[in-house]
Amino acid sequence: MERLRRRLESAEKALSSLEKLVVLEKLTEVERDAAIQRFEFSFEACWKAGRQYLYDIEGLDIGSPKSVIRSSREVNLFSDEETVTALNMVNEEAAVNCRFGWKAKYIFVAGYNHQL
């Protein structure tokens, strides 16, 4: 359970860092690149937190981001809409549109924290 808490804290920190960039109205090229990198890091931290939650709490051993997202829906952590949004973020093109992706990532982490 301690590992799960650490993973959730890491995901929250990553999302906080991402949010600082995506709330800006006009991004420079460097800020945009930084936002994309933070998006990727945030997604990685979030799905790994989800994987740990499913293992510790639900007893499921899942190995991929898409499987973690689908399993999160199956155990009622996500709504259908949240599941679709999260699955869309797995695609690389979603990283380019990260100005909107951080909201879904927040839902991802908040869903796991709510269950704890």
Image: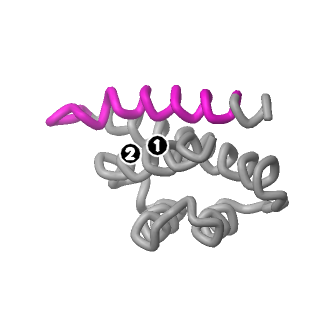
The N terminus lies in quadrant: top right
Residue that mark 2 sits on: 102
Three-letter amino acid code at the position of disc 2: Trp
Q: Looking at this rendering, what residue extends furthest in the left direction?
A: 25
Residue that mark 1 sits on: 39
Q: Could you tell me residue 29's position as x and y percent?
A: 29, 36
* For residue 72, side relative to residue 97 (left or right): right
Q: Could you tell me residue 62's position as x and y percent?
A: 79, 62
Q: Main secondary structure of the magenta part?
A: helix
The residues bearing labels 2 and 1 have C-alpha atoms spaced at a distance of: 7 Å
Question: Along the polypeptide, which appears first: circle 2 or circle 1?
Answer: 1
Whether residue 20 appears in magenta in the rendering, the answer is: yes
Up the image or down, 66 lies above or below 14; here it is below
Q: Could you tell me residue 70's position as x and y percent?
A: 62, 70
Magenta stretch: give its range.
6-28
* For residue 102, side relative to residue 44 (left or right): left
Task: Report helix, strand or loop for mark 2.
Answer: helix
> Are there few (<14), some (14-19), or many (20+) residues within 10 Å of tag 1?
many
Of discs 2 and 1, which sits in the foreground?
2
Q: Nearer the viewer, residue 78 or 104?
A: 78
Three-letter amino acid code at the position of disc 1: Phe
Q: Nearer the viewer, residue 34 or 116?
A: 116
Residue 82, image quadrant: bottom left
* For residue 71, side relative to residue 101 (left or right): right
Instruction: Give the residue drawn at x 84%, y 58%.
Output: 59
Task: Report helix, strand or loop for mark 1.
Answer: helix
Whether residue 71 appears in magenta in the rendering, the answer is: no
* For residue 84, side relative to residue 50 (left or right): left
The C terminus lies in quadrant: top right
> Which dot marks residue 86?
none
